[in-house]
């Protein structure tokens, strides 16, 4: 018998978000991990807020929302707020009830800027790493380092002379501008949209764009990222950032693998002064890596395992949406990069941990 479509909506609806989410959904395990990390950060979060005035968005809910934005590749805060209005899974993960109102996009962005600073984002990143170390997933002897380009939230048209000289831009929205024959460089020009970005290209025949650089240090056991650094784009940024991360996170006697871009006397010498062995892929001629190091079994293993760091960069640019930053300025991008790499480590932890670890299977 054919059923009839009922047009009248029910006057009352009793919806349990807990029952709507499947028992084996990956977000259940992730929510347990995130709630534990946020609970350990309660004192730090308390210091960020005044004890008087109007209540703000709860920081725990805001950070869970930012994590969802990364995991589900939501491209903007406007779209995130829109999906929060109807997506029961998002509401359950963040901690909103079915009838709770969704935050205004502008209010959310203002509160986000308070929490997405480099110090708090690094603290969240470190707490995720502590959890991985507690489970025994992190190596303390063998590491890999690499960097990648992050496109700035600025266009070529915003790249103008610092002294204000030159022709006035044509009127109107998004006018046509001809740069042909004009020599433009970071010494004489800067972006009016994001002055901290730099015009940069990595290869001889690649396109020059306004960019920043994100650098990561990963351990070679499971490919977990153990340190992150964000810098302006220039030819020495990778070596400087690698030295900063290694001195901060690697003990003397360890090994650090890298690609041929790090095969210089300068970089190898820096690692030697830190007491670290540089297992860098050798150039065809003029390599800074001596033959004795290159013949070792540990060197060959480092070159194989260092490729895992490319998985992290691929994830943050595709899933994490960090191919192009959504923020203006180096400080905000640094916080975004740390939080995105922390999200990557959390997804790796879900794959590495056993189903019954700390009762995760019970949700």
Image (tube, helix red, strand yellow):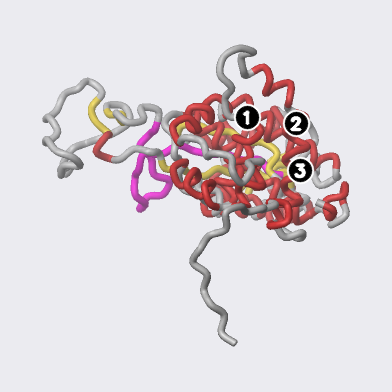
Q: Which residue is mark 1?
A: 58
Circle 2 — which element?
loop
Estimate the spatial distance between the alpha carbons at disc 3 and disc 1, rounded to whole Å.
18 Å
First in sequence, mark 1 or 2: give its number.
1
Q: Secondary structure at mark 1?
A: loop
Indicate the quadrant where residue 228 lies. Answer: top right
Q: State the extent of the magenta-drawn residues as a range.
A: 197-218
- x 68%, y 45%: residue: 144
State the image quarter where residue 119 is shown.
top right
Q: Is residue 286 at least partly visible in the picture?
A: no
Q: Nearer the viewer, mark 3 or mark 1?
A: 1
Q: Are marks 3 and 1 in contact (CB under 8 Å)?
A: no
Q: Mark number for residue 177?
A: none
Q: How far from the left and from the top, in percent, is residue 107? A: 48, 30
Crowding at label 2, few (<14), some or many (≥20) Cα neighbours within 10 Å? some
To which residue does mark 2 refer? 275
Distance between mark 2 and mark 3 Cα atoms: 35 Å
Q: In the image, is 100 to the left or to the right of 361?
A: left
Q: Quadrant of residue 161?
A: top left
Query: What is the crowding at mark 3: few (fewer than 14 residues within 10 Å), some, or many (at least 20)?
Result: some
The residue indicated by pointer 3 is 33
* Left or right: 197, with 300 as reference point: left
Q: Earlier in the sequence, mark 3 or mark 1?
A: 3
The label nearer to you, 2 versus 3, is: 3
């Amino acid at each position: 018998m054919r059923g009839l479509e009922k047009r009248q909506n029910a006057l009352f609806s009793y919806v349990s978000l807990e029952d709507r989410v499947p028992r084996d959904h990956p977000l259940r395990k992730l929510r347990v991990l995130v709630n534990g990390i946020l609970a350990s950060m309660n004192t730090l979060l308390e210091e960020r807020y005044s004890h008087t005035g109007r209540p703000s968005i709860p920081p725990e809910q805001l950070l869970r929302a930012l994590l969802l934005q990364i995991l589900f590749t939501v491209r903007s805060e406007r779209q995130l707020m829109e999906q929060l209005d109807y997506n029961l899974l998002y509401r359950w993960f963040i901690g909103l009830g079915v009838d709770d109102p969704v935050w205004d996009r502008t209010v959310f962005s203002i509160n986000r800027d308070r929490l997405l600073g480099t110090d708090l984002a690094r603290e969240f990143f470190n707490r995720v790493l502590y959890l991985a170390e507690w489970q025994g997933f992190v190596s303390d002897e063998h590491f890999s380092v690499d960097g990648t380009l992050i496109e700035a939230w600025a266009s070529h048209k915003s790249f103008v002379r610092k002294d204000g000289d030159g022709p006035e831009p044509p009127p109107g929205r998004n006018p046509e501008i001809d740069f042909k024959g004009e020599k433009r460089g970071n010494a004489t020009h800067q972006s009016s949209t994001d002055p901290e970005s730099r015009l940069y290209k990595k290869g001889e025949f690649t396109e020059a764009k306004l960019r920043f650089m994100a650098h990561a240090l990963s351990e070679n056991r499971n490919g977990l990222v153990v340190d992150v650094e964000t810098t302006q784009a220039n030819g020495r940024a990778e070596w400087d950032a690698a030295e900063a991360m290694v001195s901060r996170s690697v003990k003397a006697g360890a090994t650090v693998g890298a690609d041929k871009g790090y095969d210089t006397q300068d970089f190898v010498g820096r690692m030697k002064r830190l007491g670290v062995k540089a297992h860098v892929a050798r150039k065809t001629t003029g390599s800074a890596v001596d033959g004795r190091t290159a013949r070792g079994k540990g060197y060959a293993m480092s070159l194989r395992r260092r490729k895992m760091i490319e998985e992290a960069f691929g994830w943050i640019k595709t899933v994490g949406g960090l191919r192009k930053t959504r923020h203006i300025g180096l400080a905000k991008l640094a916080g975004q990069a740390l939080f995105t790499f922390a999200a990557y480590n959390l997804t790796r932890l879900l794959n590495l941990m056993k189903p019954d670890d700390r009762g995760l299977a019970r949700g």
